[in-house]
Image (spheres, rainbow, N blue to C red):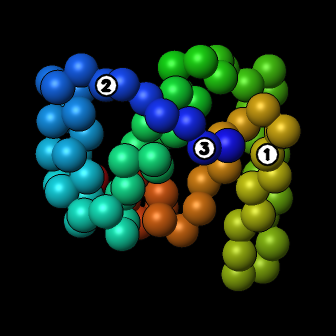
Amino acid sequence: MKTTLDLPDDVAELLRKESARRGGRKRASLTRLVSRAVREVYAGEPDKPAIVDLKAGRVVVKRESRMPVVDSEDLADALDD
């Protein structure tokens, strides 16, 4: 869904700095940063922990529908931190 947000100047500046810190708009767009923050604050804790299935040579994490989606960019950001 597309929408327009009227952000206070200080919040917009924080988002720009965080985007730059994470490698710029291609790696951490303002949309991605705001979406992630809203999910962390308002989605709440999942009812059940993720199910981890250990297979030979790989790990498969099955998530509940309310858990946030973690993609390769999120993983790269986490590894950079």
Which numbered marker is on residue 13? none
Cα–Cα span, label 2 and label 1: 32 Å
Check the image and report above or below for 32 versus 44: below
Q: Position of residue 74 (x, y in %)?
A: 48, 57
In this view, the residue in front, 59 or 15, is 15
Q: Position of residue 70 (x, y in %)?
A: 60, 54
Amino acid bearing label 3: Lys
In this view, the residue in front, 60 or 27, is 27
Say what secondary structure mark 3 lies in. loop
In this view, the residue in front, 70 or 8, is 8
Amino acid bearing label 1: Arg
The answer to whether residue 26 is seen in the rendering is yes
Identify the residue position indicated by label 2 in the image.
Answer: 7
**Quarter where residue 12 is shown:** top left
In this view, the residue in front, 48 or 42, is 42
Circle 2 packing at 10 Å, graded few (<14), some (14-19), many (20+), is few
Circle 3 packing at 10 Å, graded few (<14), some (14-19), many (20+), is few
Residue at image position (15%, 36%) is: 13
Say what secondary structure mark 1 lies in. loop
Amino acid bearing label 2: Leu
- Closer to the chain start, of discs 3 and 1, is 3
Cα–Cα span, label 3 and label 1: 26 Å
Q: Is residue 66 left or right of residue 72?
A: right
Residue at image position (67%, 43%) is: 1
Which numbered marker is on residue 63? 1
Residue at image position (81%, 52%) is: 62
Identify the residue position indicated by label 3 in the image.
Answer: 2
Q: Position of residue 24 (x, y in %)?
A: 24, 64
The answer to whether residue 37 is seen in the rendering is no
- Closer to the chain start, of discs 2 and 3, is 3
